[in-house]
Amino acid sequence: MKNAIATLLFLIAFLRLPAQMVIPNDYFRSPLDTVMLLSASFGEIRAGHLHSGIDIKVFEKEGMPVLAVADGFVVRVKVSPVGFGNALYIDHPNGFTSVYGHLQRFSNEIQKYIRKEQYERESFDVDVFPGKDLIRIKKGDTIGYAGNSGTSFGPHLHFELRDTKTERPINPLHFGYNIKDTLKPIISSLIIYPFGDSSSINKNYFPVQYPLEGTDTLHPSLIAEDTLCLAGNIILASKRKI
Ligand SMILES: [Zn+2]
């Protein structure tokens, strides 16, 4: 259980804002010109990692223009059949980096630049770091189009904001974005996930879900019939009843 507590503390540390960090709440605009609805939140548990951004809905269609959230310059362009697929990283003068993943394609200027790199390297997969100021961007410029590239299960925009110096992702919702969410969460069960190759729960490598009793109160209790046998790092998560 010691490891479990350590992992839980890690998760809490991931979700908390770094001490003394000043977060502007009116600096960045939305990366899409539409109402912001999320299909995934920051810090959700994924296979072997925590979700480092938010997934914004594009209403199941590819091709919605993706806009630069502030002035800056492109510092990284990555093309890959897995992960974030076509991804773009922009550094901003206030010390944050915005990341846009699973793009269908880039803007014409960036697309031209990346084609040249692909031909020169004779490779579809490229991870390019353009020099500072080579590709300057203005707030609101179309930098690409939302898509479903890489490891993605439907069109959406994966969006991140990172501390440029440490590359640590920060929950974009701290930056003053207005997300439409009117549902009060009610926790219905506790899920225990193994986190890492040497982790197990009751000698199995699959997540285990336990229902909770009294979920409308502040202190629901766990319905578990037996002692849990945990090994390695695990993560505790709650399931929301909608
Ligand atoms: Zn995502």
Image (cartoon, rainbow, N blue to C red):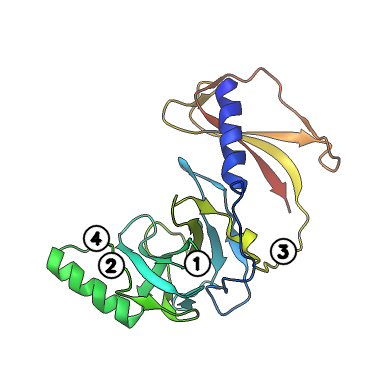
Of the numbered discs 1 and 4, the one sitting upstream in the chain is 4
Residue at 57% over, 48% down: 44
Nearer-the-camera pick, 90 or 60: 90
Seen in the picture, residue 76 relative to 133 is either above or below; the reply is above
Secondary element at tag 2: loop
Label 3–label 2 contact, CB within 8 A: no
Q: Which residue bears the numbered disc 4?
A: 125
Q: Which residue bears the numbered disc 2?
A: 130
What residue type is disc 2 on? Pro
What residue type is disc 3 on? Asp
Q: Is residue 49 left or right of residue 128?
A: right
Secondary element at tag 4: loop
Q: CA distance from mark 4 to mark 3?
A: 37 Å
Does the image show residue 235? Answer: no
Instruction: Write down the quadrant of residue 187 in the picture.
Output: top right
Of the numbered discs 2 and 4, the one sitting upstream in the chain is 4
Secondary element at tag 3: loop
Residue at 50% over, 80% down: 140
- Graded by Cα atoms within 10 Å as few (under 14), some (14 to 19) or many (20 or more), the crowding at tag 1 reads many
